[in-house]
Amino acid sequence: MDENINTIHVLFIAAEAEPFIKIGGLGDVAGALPKTIRKLSERSSGDYGIDIRLVIPYHADIKKKSFAIEKIANFQVDSISGQVPCEVYYSNQNGLPVYLLDSLAINNNSPVYHADPLLDGMKYIFFSKACLELTKHLKWPIDILHANDWHTASAVYALKTTYKRDPFFKDTKTILSLHNLPFMGFGAQDALTKYALSPGNDPYLPDWAKHSPLPLGLLTADKIIAVSPNYAKEILTPEFGCGLESFLQTRSSKIMGILNGIDTNIWNPIQDNEIICKYDSGTLTSKSKNKTALQAAFNLEISQEIPLLTLISRMDPQKGVDIAIRGLQTCINESWQAIILGTGNPVIEQMANDLANKHPTHIKTVTKFDAHLAHQLYAGSDIFLMPSRYEPCGISQMISMNYGTIPVARATGGLADTINNYKSNRADSTGFLFTKPYPSAFKCSLQRALKLFYQKDVWLRLQRNGMHQDFSWNKSAASYIQVYRSLIN
Ligand code: GLC
């Protein structure tokens, strides 16, 4: 990158990032967003280039894969019980510089997220502090520290407390992106103490939140960016604020929302090698070949006239899979078929399996992670179910619309921002939304979709509307660049 006096230096820090490691949606975002920001800023001829670099922990699972990674440095991180060594590895991912930090504090052979909150706390508080020490060690002063979720939120807090008087960070501004508010890093109190981070002392911060990384980051960030504009508003309410709503209201001038994107090179039915028959919005009849192939593979009746529903999700209470299962049970005698793909909570998996076992002719369940099958389901089904209890942004609904598969989803978070609820007089409708997280509300919305499925011209319009939307990362990246610039000015 050509360095000029106006270049903005951004350190983007996260617990996971594709292609190195992906557990959830954060991995998609940290894999795509910094890369796109860097590319976009290289292409634009504006005053400011963005030298953005990514830092993630060098997780044990990354070491098992073969990436071009070299060791470039090591340094020490202070703690109250002495210095903790940290090793720095480097990799270049299509032009994006990536640092991977390794240390006994990070890598006791533990998984990316540990079930023990204290161990997880020790790992991520260390990592957060090590990210700041890394920039000093590299003598690379940063204009912006961009942290994500609780795992890296304490880096934001440390900058405004422990490092407050450090001239190296004199002009550094901070952003905290919020992908999932309920995960606050509870249990990390001893880890904060170990790395000399004192509890928060804001009068509006509830006592229970004063020792947890995410609230402390929210307390001190110059900007809080939720991953959709609607989630940015929802977190100010008791239903979604997780007890922090009153505190967040005092910070509302710092809060905004920017929608995530999807990788439109991977999720694009006209160039998707994983599906039986490629298509675009002009050749939607070819989509039916994908449906036939699915029906055959799953031993379902082969017919274009039976709507095929699909649900692809982590089996987690957040995702409301149980709401859909209960709702489907109550309209079991109507004409539809369903394929459910996902893994996670054993109780929800069992519910899905029970449903399929009871109605084997028209419901199938696959309880595993299967990316290849996911492509085929997006392409081959008619309706995509996304009954989330909360959904900060959501990715699958955007993918399904790109594949001309109509979403039936709860009107929450990013789902409400990306799906236009069907109304007969609304030309830009793209799907069906329901408000309450109840099986009955889900069922009503599904039945509206099932009815409209047979009005072929209207259905086609919905499909095309969805496929013509721009869900690429370029749009999000451009918005983040604007925020970076506004913070520097
Ligand atoms: C979390 C949220 C999800 C969001 C993702 C990426 O996984 O639950 O809604 O899409 O983060 O921001």
Image: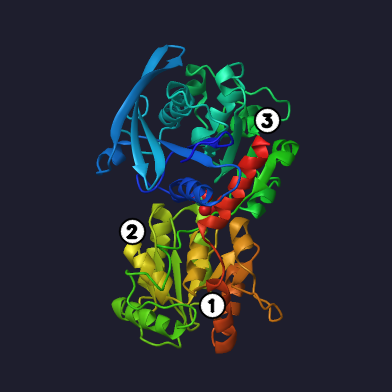
Mark-to-mark CA distance, 2 and 3: 40 Å
Left or right: 228 in relation to 289 = right
Depth order, front residue of 173/110: 173
* Secondary structure of residue under mark 3: loop
The residue type indicated by label 2 comes to: Lys
Q: Earlier in the sequence, mark 2 or mark 3?
A: 3
Residue 259, above or below 105? below
* Secondary structure of residue under mark 2: loop
Rendering coords of residue 454 (x, y %): 54, 88
Please give the label number shown on residue 368. 2
Rendering coords of residue 198 (x, y %): 58, 18
* Secondary structure of residue under mark 1: helix
Q: Quadrant of the C terminus?
A: top right
Q: Which residue is mark 1?
A: 463
Q: Earlier in the sequence, mark 2 or mark 1?
A: 2
Residue 424, above or below 120? below
Residue at image point 41% right, 78% down: 279
Residue at image point 70% right, 25% down: 202
Rendering coords of residue 113 (x, y %): 40, 38
How many numbered discs, if any? 3
Q: Which residue is mark 3?
A: 206
Residue 113 visible to the viewer: no
Residue at image point 45% right, 88% down: 305
